[in-house]
Structure formats: C-alpha cells, structure tokens
Image (spheres, helix red, strand yellow):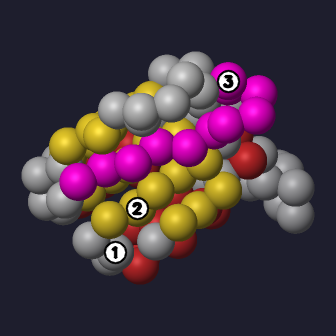
C-alpha cells in the first residue's frame, strides 16, 4: 500500500479526534505500507494519530524505516533494509526512497 498522508491533516473531517488515514491502513492489513508526507510516526495531536493507533501500528508493522528530511517511511510486517540512493538527493526536488524486503 502506498499512501500520501498529507501530514495527518483530515481536510474532509477536521474535527474528528483520530486519524482516519491510519485507521484505513490498519484495516487494510497490507504487508508493506509506504507513507509520504509524514515527518515522524508517533502519537501526537497535529497528525491526530492516537496512542492506540500508534500502538496498533507498532504491533502490526514491527519493521519501520523513517527517512529524515524527505518525509518518507516504510512500514513492514517483514524485515526490510534501506537502500541508500546512488545519487545525491535534494529534499525539495527528489523525495524518494528504496527498500529491500
């Protein structure tokens, strides 16, 4: 599953007190989830990721790689390995990552 999470903002239901995106990810039961536009996977008010959702993600996806500076991460049920890019990245123009499962 690939998901642009838009930093956790819910433009359709801004008053809801949990992350509908995270709920959808958990309900999908996908083996691998690649997220864009989430600076850090943690429970915090801005993204509306609740502690319960965060705990459920950590259980469902024990293998998580967060890439600092480009807001990309991979969550996996299986061991994963980060593949370092061969070219220099500019966080404003080249926001990508690669992983080996």
Q: Local crowd at mark 2 within 10 Å, few (<14), some, or many (≥20)?
A: many
Write down the residue under mark 2: 33
Write down the residue under mark 3: 90
Tell me which residue sits at (42%, 33%) in the image: 86
Residue 99 image offset from top left, x and y in percent: 31, 50
Q: Secondary structure at mark 2?
A: strand
Tell me which residue sits at (19%, 59%) in the image: 101
Q: Above or below — where is 76 with respect to 91?
A: below
Residue contact between numbered discs 2 and 1, judged by CB atoms under 8 Å: yes
Whichever of callouts 1 and 3 sits on the residue coming sooner in the sequence is 1
Residue 41 image offset from top left, x and y in percent: 45, 35
Write down the residue under mark 1: 30
Q: CA distance from mark 2 to mark 1?
A: 7 Å
Residue 59 appears in view: no
From the viewer's perspective, is 26 left or right of 101?
A: right
Tell me which residue sits at (87%, 63%) in the image: 12
For this orientation, the residue located farthest to the bottom is 28
Q: Nearer the viewer, residue 49 or 87?
A: 87
Q: Above or below — where is 27 with respect to 20?
A: below
């Amino acid at each position: 599953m690939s998901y642009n999470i838009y930093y956790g903002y819910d433009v359709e239901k801004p008053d809801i007190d949990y992350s509908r995106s995270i709920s959808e990810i958990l309900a999908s039961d996908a083996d691998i989830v690649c997220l864009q536009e989430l600076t850090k996977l943690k429970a915090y008010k801005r993204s509306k990721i609740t502690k319960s959702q965060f705990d459920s993600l950590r259980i469902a996806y024990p293998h998580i790689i967060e890439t600092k500076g480009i807001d990309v991460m991979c969550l996996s049920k299986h061991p994963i390995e980060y593949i370092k890019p061969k070219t220099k990245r500019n966080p404003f123009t080249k926001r990508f990552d690669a992983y080996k499962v």
